[in-house]
Amino acid sequence: MPAKLIDGKRIADAVLDEAAARVAKLSPKPSLAIVLVGDDPASIVYTKKKEDACKKVGISSQIIRLPRSSTQAQVISQVEKLNCDTSVDGILVQVPLPEGISEDAVLAAVHPEKDVDGFHPENFGKLALNLPSMVPCTPKGIIRLLKESGVLLQGKHAAVIGRSRIVGKPLALLLLNEGCTVSVCHSKTKDVGAISSTADIVCVAVGRPRLLGTGMVGEGAVVIDAGTNREGEKLVGDVDFEPVSRKTSLITPVPGGVGPMTVAMLIENTIECYEKRRGKG
């Protein structure tokens, strides 16, 4: 029997409706600044989606476009200006950055109080210690998807395939904080399938189309696909969706699963930054 789809768009729309109701009561309105360096096509698309979501809920947004030729010092200088701008509540630096610019250095330049992406070392450290912090958007969205779908996390075995700063590592920490036993698999893991096939929950975020096949998941597992890969005009995930969906109990589609939640959590994080900075939380 095919798995039940986790409708990320429906859940994200509900989050945005709640966000709009919160923003309507705030004055001045929360403000998000997005720094876009270069002209990467995917980054331009993602930035537009974030801008549209801000408009939908009533958040003020601005996109600061810097040329691909910008130096690391110039990008950091722009971030520092936004740090000092009291009208800006949240700062997002769109990644990936052009070659020659250190993402670590730029993301560390964002003030932790305005770090809507949750990538600053201070916020990452607090997440590891299970202290209140800004949480990276995609992992936060995945946890919300699981909970909204009725998945009980405590005591479950979760396999996370991928160890990026954006998804894999923070997601593993969040799952640990929820009481899961977590296995993190990556390119050096000898037999990923031997681990993932024993897990109750399998989350994959690698960037390889159809990486996760039926032999890598157990019967009735919950599968979260955070991969986005373009094949011609088609967007596909890291999961071989059709055969895997017949084996699992719950699964996220691509598109329409994790992606909408990432944007919704960005909006939620922006409001949280606003409330903490202005003493309204």
Image: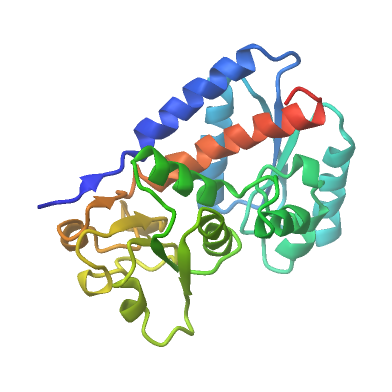
**Color style of the picture:** rainbow
Residue drawn at x 53%, y 58% is: 171
Outermost residue toward the bottom in this view: 190
Residue 107 sits in quarter: bottom right
Is residue 194 visible in the rendered image? The answer is yes
* Up-down relation of residue 237 to residue 32 (above or below): below
Residue drawn at x 15%, y 57% is: 246
Residue 145 sits in quarter: top left
Q: Is residue 214 left or right of residue 99?
A: left
Q: Which residue is at the front of the view, 269 or 79?
A: 269
Residue drawn at x 76%, y 15% is: 28
Outermost residue toward the front in this view: 155
The percent position of residue 170, horizontal first and vertical second, equals 58, 59
* Up-down relation of residue 215 to residue 29 (above or below): below
Assign the C terminus to one quadrant of the image: top right
Q: Is residue 69 left or right of residue 177?
A: right
Q: Which residue is at the front of the view, 199 or 70?
A: 199
Is residue 62 visible in the rendered image? The answer is no
The percent position of residue 265, horizontal first and vertical second, equals 55, 38
* Up-down relation of residue 183 to residue 121 (above or below): below
The percent position of residue 264, horizontal first and vertical second, equals 51, 35
The percent position of residue 30, horizontal first and vertical second, equals 71, 24
Q: How many marks?
A: 0
